[in-house]
Amino acid sequence: MTADATSAAAPVGWPDGKVAAAALTFDVDAESAVLSADPSSRTRMTVMSHQSYGPLTGVPRILSLLERHAIRATFFVPGYTAERYPSVVQGIADAGHEIAHHSYLHESTIGMDRDTEARMIDRGLEALDSVVGVRPLGYRAPMWELNYHTPSLLLDRGFEYDSSMMDCDLPYRLAESGQPDARDIVEIPVHWALDDWEQYAFVPGVTGSGLIESPDKVLAMWSRELDSFYLERCCFVLTNHPFLTGRPSRVQALERLVEKMESLEGLWVATLGEIAAHTRSLAPLPRHFPEPILPPASGPGERPVAGDGEGASR
């Protein structure tokens, strides 16, 4: 039995008397995020150096922060990053952090057909296995862009959770279809407000106008979000990119946020894999998220839309 998207996710009872959950996640995109959007950027040495700051300088600084506070985090790694920086990714794994899947070359999945997306996922899996011997349990789509066929592709490959959706503040079981016997994957939602890209991404000719916010402003915003998630007993998932947040003043702001996490009594700071396993253990009713069916045009001159009962055409 499944519930549809009109049914809210069930409240989550956190383990060991905890009242809310929080996770620090890092997307180690490095050059892949730029190369996928514009392959010609490979000739721009300074742009490439901006991206390589993540694995070369940002990751070590972030690992030091996590070690100081005895926190395990989740690192989403594109296969290309693993192949280009094998010792860095191995270092993340050796420090005890979770390695999760984040595409091969940060490919845009918007409109990507099922077979192409399957090949992309498999290529990323092969890279992570080859470099660090890891078969990841978790997946995050590039730019958080899932297709309606993506959950089935992940389930076919044994993934236990995804972290790309934005419809909730709690983890839940996402069914691949509305059928009673449908398989399901744990979904751990995210949001743009808890992503450093919107705060710090400034690369001329790559990010548009971009922006560079003060870490003080970012810390204030994320602290307010953390307080709200804590009070509502939700799951706070922060997404950072080492080439952005790995810079000194920004890591210092992140450390102040970590200290705030430590001050909140009953806050469970965990990896996404741990949160997914706990959610699964509670056996909540899976939720199906059906593709919207657009109604036909209701009068002359209105834009016609398609709908045949199975989903709108794209």
Image (cartoon, grey):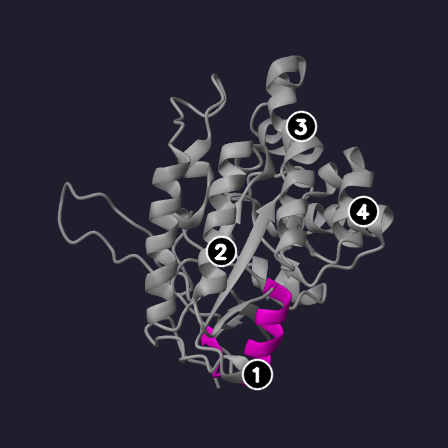
Q: Position of residue 265 (x, y in %)?
A: 45, 72
Q: Position of residue 294 (x, y in %)?
A: 30, 57
Mark 1 or 3, nearer chain start: 3
How far separated are the C-alphas under marks 1 and 3? 45 Å
Q: Which residue is mark 2?
A: 259
How far separated are the C-alphas under marks 2 and 1? 44 Å
How far separated are the C-alphas under marks 3 and 2? 28 Å
Q: Is residue 116 visible?
A: no
**Is label 1 or label 3 in front?**
3
Question: What kind of residue is marked 1?
Answer: Asp
How far separated are the C-alphas under marks 4 and 2? 27 Å
Q: Which residue is mark 3?
A: 52
Tell me, for residue 181, which label it has, or none. Answer: 1
Whether 281 is among the magenta residues is yes
Which range of residues does the magenta coloring cover? 271-287
How far separated are the C-alphas under marks 4 and 1? 39 Å
Mark 3 or 4, nearer chain start: 3
Question: What kind of residue is marked 3?
Answer: Ser
For label 4, the crowd category at 10 Å Cα-Cα, with few meaning under 14, some 14 to 19 and many 20 or more, is some
How many marks can you see? Answer: 4
For label 2, the crowd category at 10 Å Cα-Cα, with few meaning under 14, some 14 to 19 and many 20 or more, is few
The reply to whether the C-beta atoms of the residues labelled 4 and 1 are less than 8 Å apart is no
**Disc 4 element:** helix
Whether 165 is among the magenta residues is no
Mark 4 or 1, nearer chain start: 4
